[in-house]
Amino acid sequence: MGLRELLVTLEDGAERERASVLDEARAGASRIRRERGSERERRRADFLRGVEREEVDASGKALSRARADARRSVLDARLRLLERVRAALERRIAEAGEDSRYLAVVERDLRDALGRLGRRDVVVRAGDDVARALSAALEELGDSGSIESDPSLTGGFVAASADGTVEIDATLEERLTHVWPGLAIEVVRSAEA
């Protein structure tokens, strides 16, 4: 159920409860007026109008609290969903070096990086599994450069010119950081659809 549907449901319930309370208060006031004399009836009517105002105020406050609670619940649910999705993606990134489909793609990424770095004296840092795949690709391309194992990198690589002036961060963690805001919006939209 989306936020709008939840709010409409809560508003409808609060409105029905408010209408029921108001109907009961009005019916009670009408009965009292018939049973009592004019002065006593006037005092009771004043009292009932006060009670009715209090009930209207109380139901308005209850409706406001219900709306705020509903919004908070929806936001909390979205946050928990996004945390679970992000954690699942991070787990997949940690296992990327073991995925042959990813290793085929990372070789293409290396070719792109080498093209941007001018293919000269490139130093590439990657996790062990990715480093092995990139070593083979670097030899195949016949480019000068070296591959260094960096256990802190689980998916992707960091390629730098030998003098360190240009660096390309092609890690999956970095890519996730860049795409996460848009991806988070899509995840929430999809979940609420």
Image (tube, grey):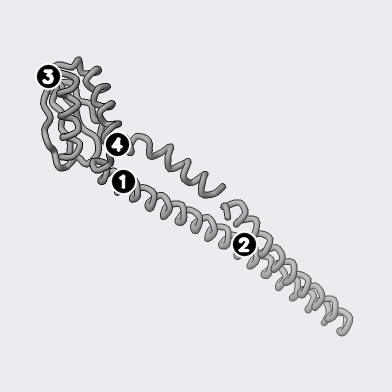
Q: Amino acid at mark 2?
A: Leu
- Sequence-first tag of 1 and 2: 2
Label pair 3/4, CB-CB below 8 angstroms: no
Q: Give 173 or 14, whichever is nearer the viewer.
A: 173
Task: Give the label on residue 63, or none.
Answer: 2
Q: Is residue 2 left or right of residue 77?
A: right
- Sequence-first tag of 3 and 1: 1
Give the structural element (helix, strand or loop) at label 1.
helix
Instruction: Give the number of marks.
Output: 4
Residue 176 position in % (x across, y down): 33, 38
Q: Which residue is mark 4?
A: 102
Q: Amino acid at mark 3?
A: Ser
- Where's the N terminus, which quadrant? bottom right
- Sequence-first tag of 1 and 4: 1
Give the structural element (helix, strand or loop) at label 4.
helix
- Sequence-first tag of 2 and 4: 2
Give the structural element (helix, strand or loop) at label 2.
helix
Task: Give the label on residue 144, or none.
Answer: 3
Q: Give 180 or 46, whichever is nearer the viewer.
A: 180
Residue at figure coordinates x 63%, y 61% from the top left? 10
Q: Amino acid at mark 4?
A: Tyr
Residue 41's quadrant in the figure? bottom right
Task: Give the label on residue 92, or none.
Answer: 1
Tell me the distance, in whole angstroms, between the alpha carbons under discs 3 and 2.
70 Å
Tell me the distance, in whole angstroms, between the alpha carbons under discs 1 and 4.
11 Å
